[in-house]
């Protein structure tokens, strides 16, 4: 008689069949938007929806670089501040740059103040002090009581519209002050304009230059009650007798009857194209005056997004996890209008496009973890939109984006980081086949450029320090990752000659390996390595590396870990060097880059080039060491406090690392489709995949002291590998991980069980 194992049959059916959506849980309750808002996290605090163009929130006094380190106000907000100047509609989250903070609105009363207050001198200009106990931040909602004005400010948003609700408890000369000259750090207004349409509608624009050299933000503003009087200003001079004003620093005071109308609501639509489109965005996305309903809709959008992963564990870990997941959906932000129009990099308007255009591509950061995370969580449409945006940028500027912001190429950071993202979308079949040839053209053209040392790479040689005195090794190692991506894409598309060429190019990293010191080191044109050489020297962007030192860049070969191990002479020497790296002194010497944070030994969790380091151990057969290191990094550098991020969130990449790592997997090589197991932090996580299947990761013996994987089962069967592939993940089903406080040194040790067996 044949005995059937019904449990295994059921698991097989579940793994192969699409499943209905899980019941929605209330997950926004676990998000604490203040995490990462203090010190160097630089996260945005305010009201937005997933990937929304509008990020409406407070802007504070950016305390000056020389006295108070204004760098920590790059997002416009820092938890340690005790004042709010007003509320602006665009922000950057987790970056090191202080652009945006466009269209400042101040709900004020009393004397009209034309300039923002100075630090610790609130009486010198507009703005108000506030108390932390009177401040609320939730996904899609921000609220605060402005003490000096006695105004309760409530904010919410849709994708392209900011919705303000102000309750005035002091009606003396009540007005809304609009300052189009307001700036954060080095950004500045170059042109501005306001026009009154009627007693409740105003339109205008703010053009500015900063990190992004030519930013254009058009706006439309509608009020819920009539504006009784308007005063326009340019700088400090009032402009009389006109309903339209234009100049470099235009401001306006809109007065209303706060005795009759204690509450005033304001809707502000944004567009990069026109004031007409900004008005239309309001009509399409927020036609009615119902703040409570708008707030609920924003919360529902966030809740739907967060439910893509149902993560179970202790309350503190859930808060850290869901806040991290929340932060991964701040960018790339939408950069088109409701009708499909957008402003291109070439400053031309592209009308009624059939894809959603995006901006804020912090690709040097996000190619490593955030984009791979989107490929697991989001449907084809959103990920295709990211790629179609990049291809449009290529067509408009002649190369793929590097760090793209508001229709501008900033060319910030090193390498060609869009190539791995585009290649991955082709290799995984996310992009439609009809777009493959354009994608390849974009990748190849970008890779065959001449700037920043590419002319040497084109000729299959190293970049001499004679021609690039700083960061040559960083550029070269990042180029090699992009070249590997081009190689794999060429193989996928059957482009044999191109594949052979890029296979040679991605191996060029070997030419920088100095066996005498055991690091990648800059080389002169005559072949000599840089001398004198200090592997710890980390002066900001003044060595052969970028925001790092030789130790930290020794491991930046995620595309060819096998080749890296061979450079060290095999597993034993590789592991010895890796152990030294993660246990040595964390002293960086003087003048170290501010970006090198979250140190365990010299391993810097706070900066992206080291994000894959814990997972390298699995490639050499000691996955247990990687588990311990990943757990240590999560426990020490991700907390539920306002300073709970050890470095810039970098448009969500720091958070994406935690989302992956807390679930116990990470894409060490971001385009290989291989996820290395680490040290899961939950009791259970259920991921809804793009194909509507579900992958459930069940963890036994979860405890803070239990860092190590003892064993794994896949759909009920023993699973000895220290990795899992993209194709296997997409099948759904179950993974059961048993944890232990002591390492199982044999798990994942056999050569066939290491990711090196299938990578490349």
Image (spheres, helix red, strand yellow):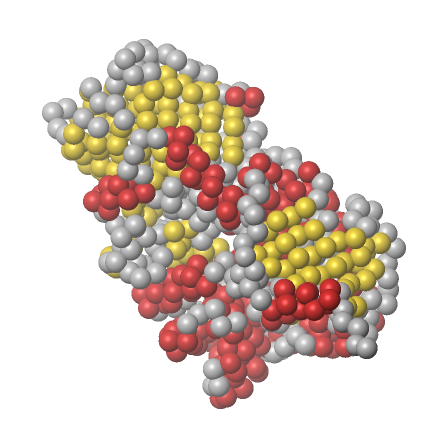
Residue furthest to the bottom in view is: 497
The image quarter containing residue 352 is bottom left
What is the x, y in percent for residue 749?
Answer: 82, 70
Tell me the residue at 56%/75% (across/down): 484
* Position of 661 relative to 622 (above/below): above
Tell me the residue at 42%/15% (across/down): 150
Residue furthest to the left in view is: 241
Quarter that holds the C terminus: bottom right
What is the x, y in percent for residue 42?
Answer: 54, 41
Tell me the residue at 81%/55% (across/down): 739
Tell me the residue at 46%/44% (across/down): 301
Instruction: Determine if residue 531 is in view.
Output: no
What is the x, y in percent for residue 610?
Answer: 66, 58
Report whether 2 appears left or right of 692.
right
Residue furthest to the front in view is: 1
Closer to the camera in the image, 520 or 714: 714
Q: How many marks?
A: 0
Report whether 599 appears left or right of 542.
right
Quarter that holds the N terminus: bottom right
The image quarter containing residue 13 is bottom right
Report whether 451 appears left or right of 757.
left
* Position of 99 relative to 245 (above/below): below
What is the x, y in percent for residue 116?
Answer: 38, 26
Instruction: Determine if residue 83 is in view.
Output: yes
The image quarter containing residue 618 is bottom right
* Position of 455 relative to 538 (above/below): below
Report whether 378 appears left or right of 238.
right
Closer to the camera in the image, 541 or 246: 246
């Amino acid at each position: 008689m044949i005995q059937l194992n019904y449990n295994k049959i059921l698991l097989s059916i579940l793994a192969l069949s699409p499943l209905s959506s899980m019941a929605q849980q209330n997950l926004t309750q676990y998000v604490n938007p203040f995490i990462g808002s203090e010190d160097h996290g630089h996260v945005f605090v305010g009201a937005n929806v997933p990937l929304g163009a509008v990020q409406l929130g407070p802007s504070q006094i950016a305390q000056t670089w020389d006295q108070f380190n204004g760098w920590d106000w790059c997002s416009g907000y820092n938890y340690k501040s005790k004042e709010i100047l007003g509320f602006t509609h665009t922000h950057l989250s987790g970056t090191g740059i202080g652009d945006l903070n466009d269209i400042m609105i101040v709900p004020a009363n009393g004397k009209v103040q034309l300039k923002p207050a100075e630090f610790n001198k609130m009486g010198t200009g507009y703005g108000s002090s506030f108390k932390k106990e009177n401040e609320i931040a939730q996904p899609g909602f921000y609220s605060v009581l402005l003490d000096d004005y006695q105004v309760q400010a409530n904010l919410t948003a849709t994708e392209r519209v900011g919705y303000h609700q102000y309750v005035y408890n002091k009606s003396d000369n009540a007005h809304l002050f609009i300052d189009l000259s307001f700036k954060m750090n080095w950004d500045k207004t170059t042109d501005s304009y306001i026009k009154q349409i009627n007693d409740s509608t105003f339109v205008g624009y703010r053009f500015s230059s900063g990190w992004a050299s030519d930013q254009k933000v058009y706006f439309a503003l509608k009020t819920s009650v009539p504006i009784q009087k308007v005063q326009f200003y340019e700088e400090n001079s009032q402009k009389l007798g006109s309903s339209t004003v234009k100049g470099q620093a235009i401001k306006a005071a809109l007065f209303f009857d706060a005795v009759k109308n204690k509450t005033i609501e304001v809707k502000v639509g944004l567009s990069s194209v026109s004031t007409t489109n900004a008005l239309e965005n309001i009509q399409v996305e927020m036609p009615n005056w119902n703040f409570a309903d708008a707030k609920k809709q924003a919360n529902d959008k966030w809740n739907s997004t967060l439910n893509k992963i149902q993560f179970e564990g202790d309350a503190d870990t859930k808060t850290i996890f869901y806040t991290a997941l929340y932060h991964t959906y701040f960018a790339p932000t939408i950069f088109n209008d409701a009708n499909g129009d957008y402003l291109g990099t070439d400053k031309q308007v592209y009308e009624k496009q059939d894809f959603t255009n995006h901006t804020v591509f912090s690709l040097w950061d996000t190619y490593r973890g955030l984009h791979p995370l989107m490929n697991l969580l989001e449907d084809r449409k959103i990920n295709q939109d990211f790629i179609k945006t990049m291809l449009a940028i290529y067509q408009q500027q002649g190369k793929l984006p590097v760090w793209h912001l508001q229709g501008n190429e900033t060319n910030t950071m090193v390498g060609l980081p869009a190539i791995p993202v585009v290649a991955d979308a082709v290799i995984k079949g996310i992009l439609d086949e009809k777009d493959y040839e354009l994608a390849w053209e974009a990748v190849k053209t970008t890779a065959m450029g001449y700037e920043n040392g590419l002319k040497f790479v084109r000729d299959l040689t190293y970049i001499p320090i004679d021609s690039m005195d700083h960061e040559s090794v960083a550029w070269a190692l990042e180029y090699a990752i992009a070249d590997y991506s081009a190689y794999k894409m060429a193989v996928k598309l059957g482009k044999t000659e191109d594949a052979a060429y890029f296979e040679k190019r991605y191996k060029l990293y070997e030419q920088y390996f100095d066996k005498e010191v055991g690091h990648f080191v800059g080389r002169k044109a005559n072949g000599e390595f840089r001398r004198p050489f200090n592997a710890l020297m980390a002066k900001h962007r003044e060595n052969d590396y970028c925001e790092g030192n030789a130790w930290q860049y020794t491991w930046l070969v995620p595309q060819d870990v096998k080749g890296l191990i061979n450079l060290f002479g095999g597993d034993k020497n590789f592991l010895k060097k890796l152990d030294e790296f993660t246990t040595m002194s964390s002293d960086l010497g003087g003048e170290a880059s501010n970006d090198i944070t979250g140190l365990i030994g010299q391993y810097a969790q706070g900066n992206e080039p080291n994000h894959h380091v814990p997972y390298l151990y699995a490639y050499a057969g000691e996955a247990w060491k990687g588990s311990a290191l990943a757990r240590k990094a999560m426990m020490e550098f991700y907390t539920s406090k306002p300073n709970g991020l050890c470095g810039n969130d970098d448009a969500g990449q720091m958070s994406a690392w935690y989302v992956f790592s807390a679930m116990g997997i990470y894409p060490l090589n971001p385009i290989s489709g291989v996820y290395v197991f680490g040290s899961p932090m939950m009791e259970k996580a259920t991921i809804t995949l793009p194909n509507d299947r579900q992958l459930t990761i069940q963890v036994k013996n979860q405890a803070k002291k239990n860092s190590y994987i003892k064993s794994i089962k896949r759909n009920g069967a023993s699973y000895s590998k220290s990795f899992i592939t993209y194709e296997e993940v997409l099948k759904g089903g179950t993974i059961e991980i048993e944890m232990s406080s002591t390492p199982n040194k044999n798990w994942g040790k056999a050569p066939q069980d290491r990711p090196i067996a299938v990578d490349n």
